[in-house]
Amino acid sequence: MKARRLSRRGFIRGAAAAAALPTLSALRPFYGTVAHAAEPAPLRIGMVAGLTGAVAGWAQASVIANKYIVDEVNRTGGIKSMGGAKLEFIYADCESDPKKMVTELEKMLELKKPHVLVTGGSSALTKPALPVIGRYKVPLVSREYSDELLAMGSQYFFMPMPKITVNAKAMADTFIRIGKQKNQPAKRVAVLCQDGSFGEMASDVFGKYFPSQGVNVVANQIYPTGKVADFSDTISKFKALNADALVCSVTPYESALIMRAVKAVNFNPLGVAFSCTCIDTADYSNLGNDGDYAFGVPVFSMEEIGDRIKGAVPFLKEFYSKVTSEAERKLCTEKAVLECVLVIGIAIQAIENAKSYDSVAIRNAMSKLDLKTGDRYIYWPDGVKFDETGYNTRTQTVCGQYQKLKLKIMYPEPLMAPGVQAVWPMPKWTERVASGGGGSPIADCKCGANI
């Protein structure tokens, strides 16, 4: 199925962060679509996201995965409860700018009139969108993690992924548990988080929870997202404070900058962690060996837990067999793909159940979903059931560590493979194999992704 171009503007606008990203054949120009006009009328799924700029590492994978799912649904008969109506995926770039998020979303809602919306992974961009979707009464399914979004009380917002407060506490608990098991507990932790609700809520959790467990927080710094090109001064300060662990809540692009700074100043903590995860993105994988041994949450490892997620292995194998561009495959890590298809899968299930083009009816159907792991496109632990705030009460978070560029699950303990142990402390930089750069932590996964 071919994509139609409905835009007058090019997709890439020259944002500084985008210069390091690959050119993707799957990312069509502004308001690219995936559908043929057909009877009955198509059902439109819309997305406005930071396809360029600081959060592009999340958003670009969403476009690729969403286009794939829409094509698959259309190829296999469309929305059967509505006479085989086809899906149409429309998307626009807000350049990772919250103000442009509002203007682009309003433009899309006015001109293209999507029946349901999905997001590409940025709480800072989704926050200003919530009043807009309330005015237009169009439901939005989120890839975000921020508790603040749920607290805003939007009846049209749905968040299937674990809250940042849940992820941050899980990461802190993992560090504390591993430190005790290895008889080298972290005693002095440095915290580095982006501004906005996503990073600031993580900062607050780390700042309170570590001390409650007897761990001293020697620094807790917030930085302006997309405005720091070199974190060396910050990491040098943490080193001077004798921090023995570093925990972060940042963007994919900035996670790579932080690890480069950690190496540049020869900072050798017991562990480095990113919550929510950046370690399984294309930005981070470009570090090669220099990105090894970091922790992240939430993550997914087909090699470690794939067999326990009904349907995930065959789905990923088929996905990677059809996504043939090397650049696209590198963006589409296992976790990113499963997260994206979970989000759009929820939207599709709600459309199917609603049997309607009415966005309010789709919203009401979404609020009543009861989906199990292994249902169509629901390849995430524990399934989906939303509470009155739009939060998935069955959500599960998974923490892992890269070891020799393979992801090993560290939390929850029942998901850990037999015999797996954390590498703690991380090897000193002087002890590591020199990095050739450009390596991929998921290059050896068993799901068919030949990055």
Image (spheres, rainbow, N blue to C red):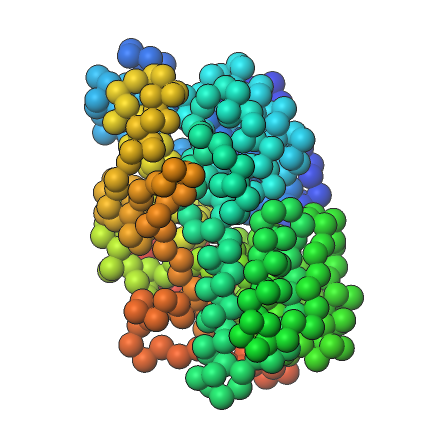
Q: Residue at 40% across / 70% down in the picture?
A: 410
Q: Is residue 323 left or right of residue 56?
A: left
Q: Is residue 284 left or right of residue 414?
A: right
Q: Residue at 40% across / 61% down in the picture?
A: 398
Number of marks drawn: 0
Residue closer to the observer: 331 or 169: 169
Residue closer to the observer: 169 or 258: 169
Q: Quadrant of the C terminus?
A: bottom left
Which corner quadrant of the image does residue 229 belong to?
bottom right
Decide if residue 282 is in sight here.
Answer: yes
Q: Quadrant of the N terminus?
A: top left
Task: Reply above or below: 4 against 404.
Answer: above
Residue with the most extreme bottom position: 183
Q: Residue at 31% across / 44% down in the picture?
A: 384
Which corner quadrant of the image does residue 250 belong to?
bottom right
Task: Reply above or below: 256 against 3.
Answer: below
Q: Residue at 50% across / 73% down in the picture?
A: 175
Q: Is residue 206 left or right of residue 299?
A: right
State the image coordinates of residue 289 (x, y, percent, origin top left).
Answer: 55, 70
Q: Is residue 13 left or right of residue 111?
A: right
State the image coordinates of residue 240 (x, y, percent, origin top left).
Answer: 76, 77
State the image coordinates of residue 277 (x, y, percent, origin top left).
Answer: 51, 57
Decide if residue 316 is in sight here.
Answer: no
Task: Reply above or below: 404 against 385.
Answer: below
State the image coordinates of residue 298 (x, y, percent, origin top left).
Answer: 44, 57
Residue closer to the observer: 244 or 76: 244
Task: Reply above or below: 428 against 108.
Answer: below
